[in-house]
Image (cartoon, rainbow, N blue to C red):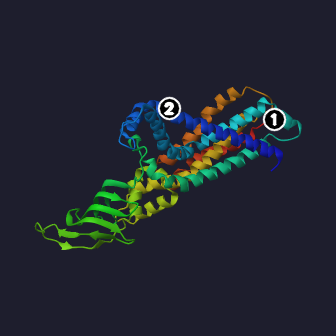
Amino acid sequence: MRLLDRYIARQFLKNLVLLHVVLFSFVLVIDFSLNFDEYVSIARDMKGPGGEEPSGVRVALVSALLVVDLWWPRLFQLFNYLLGIMLVGAMAFTCSQMVRNREFVAMLASGQSLLRVARPMLLCALLMVGIQTVNREFVVPHLAELLTRSKDDAGKRGLATGARMLTADAQGRLFYARSFDLKNGVIDGLWVWERDSEGLMARRITADSARWNGAAWKLINGMARTRSAAVGEGSPINEIVTDLSPTVLKLRRYEGYSDNLSTRQISELIARYRSEAEPPINRIDSLERIRFGRIATMIGSLLSLLMCLPFFLRREPTNMVLQSLICSPLALAAQMAGVLGAAAAIPGLPPQFSVFVPVLVLLPLAIASLSNVKT
């Protein structure tokens, strides 16, 4: 990479990092100020090592640590959501600094094209999109349990343990657990209802506890009773073979947070749904939009960057604040189009295609915008 490319790439990445630091700090401060009383209340409830009441300094320190503990995994998630607009912001700041220092004039005087400036920034943008992909596929899914926490759960771990699980397997059986530990594959207080073709209970299985052995749930004190069985009647049962492994139960539990799952996990969840007797089409389409929408969102982020570049690649010094005011609505609209296209269903189009509609709209706009650069 030439000296000029390294210089522009360094400025671009520096501005990008600075924007993220400023925004993340702003988010933490705003959340702490708005929910100060709640964090202080949680900190006061945490007794000292000897059970003594915490001091004011300790309450203040613990309150600040609770905010950091709650938000550090969320910052990885926030990075995925805001990278597109951050790329445009870093590009705008980089070009503004070069216009202010008359560096574009020097480049043009040396026979360089202004489009030469775009090359290192686009390469850096591709690098950041790659980091976003790694973050989305490996980091965020690993932190999915921490991302489900509320303020009351700040400072807590082991969220794979929960209570009152009620879900159905591929055979239509309903599973209920008094409590469960999905990390260790253990269920306490298991109830299973087997239903007939009319949806009525045909048999009930109960067990004090159950442990996943890799292929089935091994029951402890398991009993199976038919609907017509008298009180006290039943037959012992040692295991239940089902597709509801701890991994599947974990996916079901965090289905409301599907954006936090990796593409492999989403594909596994879609395959489970499609294997059911009556596949839930709406859920499958929603997961398909998330799976393919990630690709469309990344492409849309790069296209919005290309579309906004001509506003800041200027031959002559100009008011860059005015250029920013003109460009901001366009950049926000492009980002919102990508987000809405990945989330909203378009009647008559399959979700695998509908998520790319914003990309098809942004592509000619980006080409037309770049062709208007005066260089």
Count the marks: how many?
Answer: 2
Local packing at callout 1 (Cα closer than 10 Å; few below 14, some 14-19, many 20+) is many
Q: Secondary structure at mark 1?
A: helix
Q: Secondary structure at mark 2?
A: helix
Furthest-right residue in this view: 110
Q: Is residue 213 left or right of residue 351?
A: left
In this rendering, the label closer to the viewer, 1 or 2: 2
> Which label's residue is closer to the chain start, 1 or 2?
2
Q: Is residue 63 left or right of residue 116?
A: left
Q: Quadrant of residue 174?
A: bottom left
Can you say which quadrant of the picture contains the C terminus? Answer: top right
Q: Is residue 23 left or right of residue 95?
A: left
Q: Quadrant of residue 34?
A: top left
Please name the residue that numbered disc 2 is placed on: 30
Please name the residue that numbered disc 1 is placed on: 104
Residue at 40%, 31% in the rendered image: 37
Q: Is residue 119 left or right of residue 258?
A: right
The answer, for residue 88, to whether it is visible in the render is no
Q: Is 29 situated above or below 277?
A: above
Give the Cα distance between marks 1 and 2: 38 Å
What amino acid is labelled 1 in the image?
Phe
Q: Is 255 situated above or below 18?
A: below
Coordinates of residue 85 in the picture (x, y in percent):
61, 39
The answer, for residue 243, to whether it is visible in the render is yes
